[in-house]
Amino acid sequence: MLSLDRVQQIKQYLIKRISKYNFKNKLKMDLILKEKRKLQATKYFEKKAQNVAQIILSIPFICILLWSFQASKNKMIMSATGEIVLSSHAPLETISAQSNQLKGVVNKADRTFAFTVPIRSFEGFNSPLQKEHFNESYLESSKYANANFKGQIIEKINFDNDTVCFFRCKGLLKIHGVEKERIIRLKMEVKQQQITVDGNFIVPLSDHNIYIPKIVMQKISSEIKTEISVRFINTP
């Protein structure tokens, strides 16, 4: 039979072991809570970053608006509607996507212009997965939110009289964060103060550091046909 002293010793031993066990568990719980708080903080700041990113995404067009208000109204024309269509014609598949969020302004006095379109505004494709790859793998729209084109019209043209004419515009086309100088030929029709500009051109993906994996080269073209149609309301 155990003596009273021995029983007390065993009791004290068990209390110490239990306390040590509880202390270790408390440390584990503290670490878990610490990691949980870190994860919550990360998600919070990611959400804040997304909100900031959304504001940043609008900066190119805000800049266009500021530019337009720096000059007198009768020298500037802003787009009322704008559509852009992208087409890939490859041996095994044809893919098409379009956006109606092409926006821009033209300064009639010095013939300068600026246009922008949000990459994520493109719809269409042949499947939701294609749209996902377009945004995440190829255009990286979370990093490069907009495609922009700014420059100057080469020919002197009259925006105020009814006419149909062709002209060239020279500028920097920025896609996927890479700028490339381009000269693009467009058609303009002016009728009763409404100006319509249409045209198409080819964009080689390699010009903007966009590369297609070999496994899908038969399904995605290395050159994208780009068609635009923009309508302006003119103020003589």
Image (tube, rainbow, N blue to C red):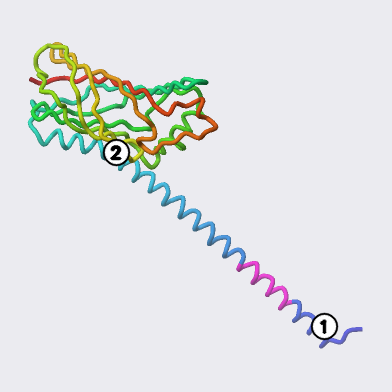
Q: Is residue 124 left or right of residue 7?
A: left
Magenta region, main secondary structure: helix
- Circle 1 — which element? helix
Residue 96 occupies which quadrant of the picture? top left
Residue depth check, mark 2 versus mark 1: number of the one nearer the observer: 2
Q: Dot 1, crowdedness within 10 Å: few (<14), some or many (≥20)? A: few
Q: Are marks 2 and 1 in contact (CB under 8 Å)?
A: no
Cα gap from disc 2 to disc 1, whole angstroms: 84 Å
Which residue carries the number 1 mark? 7
**Quarter of the figure with the N terminus:** bottom right
Q: Is residue 25 left or right of residue 118?
A: right
Q: Position of residue 15 (x, y in %)?
A: 72, 77
Q: Position of residue 207 (x, y in %)?
A: 35, 35
Which residue carries the number 2 mark? 179
Q: Is residue 55 above or below residue 128?
A: below
Residue 234 occupies which quadrant of the picture? top left
Q: Nearer the viewer, residue 106 or 100?
A: 106
Q: Is residue 16 magenta?
A: yes
Q: Which residues are magenta?
A: 15-27
Q: Position of residue 200 (x, y in %)?
A: 30, 20
**Quarter of the figure with the C terminus:** top left
Residue 97 occupies which quadrant of the picture? top left
Q: Dot 2, crowdedness within 10 Å: few (<14), some or many (≥20)? A: some
Amino acid found under the numbered disc labelled 2? Glu
Q: Is residue 139 above or below residue 201?
A: below
Q: Which mark is residue 204?
A: none
- Circle 2 — which element? strand
